Image: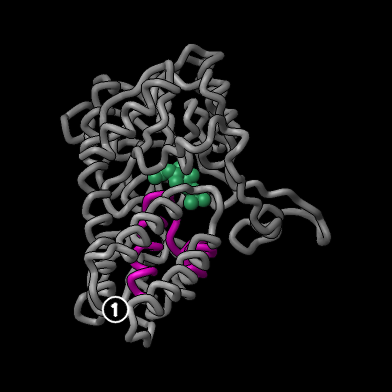
Amino acid sequence: MRTVFWDYEQNNVKMIDQRTLPWSVDIVAYEDYRVVAQAIQEMVVRGAPAIGAAAAFGLALAAQQSQATNRLTLIKEIEAAAAHLNAARPTAVNLYWALQRLLRLAVSEELDSADDVRHALLQEAQNLADEDVALNRRMGFHGAELVSDGDTILHHCNTGALATVDWGTALGVIFAAHEQGKKIHVLVDETRPRLQGARLTCWELQQRGISYDLIADNAAGYFMRRGEVNLVLVGSDRTAANGDVANKIGTYQVAVLAKENGIPFYPVVPTSTVDLNLAHGDLIPIEERDPTEVVAVWGTPIAPDGATARNPAFDVTPHRYVTGIVTEAGIVYPPFVKNLRRAVEAEQKK
Ligand code: MRU
């Protein structure tokens, strides 16, 4: 089953509710784009490519909800809905990228009527979702060449089928290497405060029968220094033109530790996550979430009443710590300014 999909019989958007995993697998349905935006904000759906697809289906939903009979009136309403969806989470550029792709189509002169626009938007959201699955497979194939039989791979957050429409980015590389028969072991960072590693990555690895151990986030350096890690694979929510990588909070310290210990560090990044408009990573907007996520673990308080907390959801890893970036166009190596642009433009021409 896909993480997010359109139900053509019931004419609504459906998602796996990632807040209740791994304890129960619940499917939720949405018939209002505003509730889709809320689902993105509350992380019912999360992971950069998955929220891009959710936003695209959300915009198709907005077009269907609208009573407009006139094409231009519908376009105005869709633009307002896109702004609302885009505000749900600021760091993952896939949200903006997906909405822009649909908005460009909505204003196309070739669409004569409001119903033409409605039909085209749903079709485009579906195309985007289907393409996500196909390109994740390609990235997995490219990235698997970095994995040797017997490797132990350290992984941060969740970048699997749940973070995408299906298959995954960094975990997709691990799945591809496993499919090729390579014997691998994964050290799974628990990924405080939302525990995407413990709850979601362990669940996905377990389902595929891939060997893993869950580790506390602060144990990564211990295993690296002991020579127990061969490779680090992570995802990204936005990668700047110079190869600086924004990803789940804690990625930066993993990258620094990897360099210190001579371990290759590869983000696995679809070109839709590369923001060529941003020269460097310090320009990437970083989401700060509710401090209650830090002072409690899944509702159980771990600090005294009244404790204050900070909760940045992402950090930026400067490109000097990045060995290479796996994309669907192949593995990109420094100089990233030149080579990332080349990879992104090659994919855009397809
Ligand atoms: O806050 P989340 O769970 O949406 O953050 C997800 C990540 O940081 C992933 O590593 C990233 O989206 C890339 S995975 C496809």
Examine the image and state in which quarter residue 273 appears. Answer: top left
Helix, strand or loop under label 1 = helix
The one of 59 and 135 positioned closer to us in this rendering: 59
The one of 120 and 180 positioned closer to us in this rendering: 120
Point out residue 307 in the picture as x, y percentages from the top left corner.
81, 55
Q: Quadrant of the N terminus?
A: bottom left
- Residue drawn at x 31%, y 77% is 12
Q: Outermost residue, right direction?
A: 306
- Residue drawn at x 36%, y 53% is 162
Examine the image and state in which quarter residue 335 appears. Answer: top left
Tell me if residue 118 can be seen.
Answer: yes
Point out residue 314 in the picture as x, y percentages from the top left corner.
58, 43
Query: With 159 as the anchor, is 124 left or right in this view?
Result: left
Picture colour scheme = one colour
119 in magenta: no
Q: Quadrant of the C terminus?
A: top left
- Residue drawn at x 34%, y 55% is 101
Examine the image and state in which quarter residue 30 appears. Answer: bottom left
Q: Residues within 10 Å of mark 1 (few under 14, many from 20)?
A: many
The one of 180 and 93 positioned closer to us in this rendering: 93
Under mark 1, the amino acid is Ala
Query: With 204 as the anchor, is 76 left or right in this view?
Result: right
Magenta stretch bounds:
37-61
45 in magenta: yes
Point out residue 143 in the picture as x, y percentages from the top left corner.
28, 28
Q: Which residue is mark 1?
A: 114
Would you place residue 184 above or below residue 64 in this image? Answer: above
Which secondary structure type mostly characterizes the magenta part of the structure? helix
Query: With 142 as the anchor, is 50 left or right in this view?
Result: right
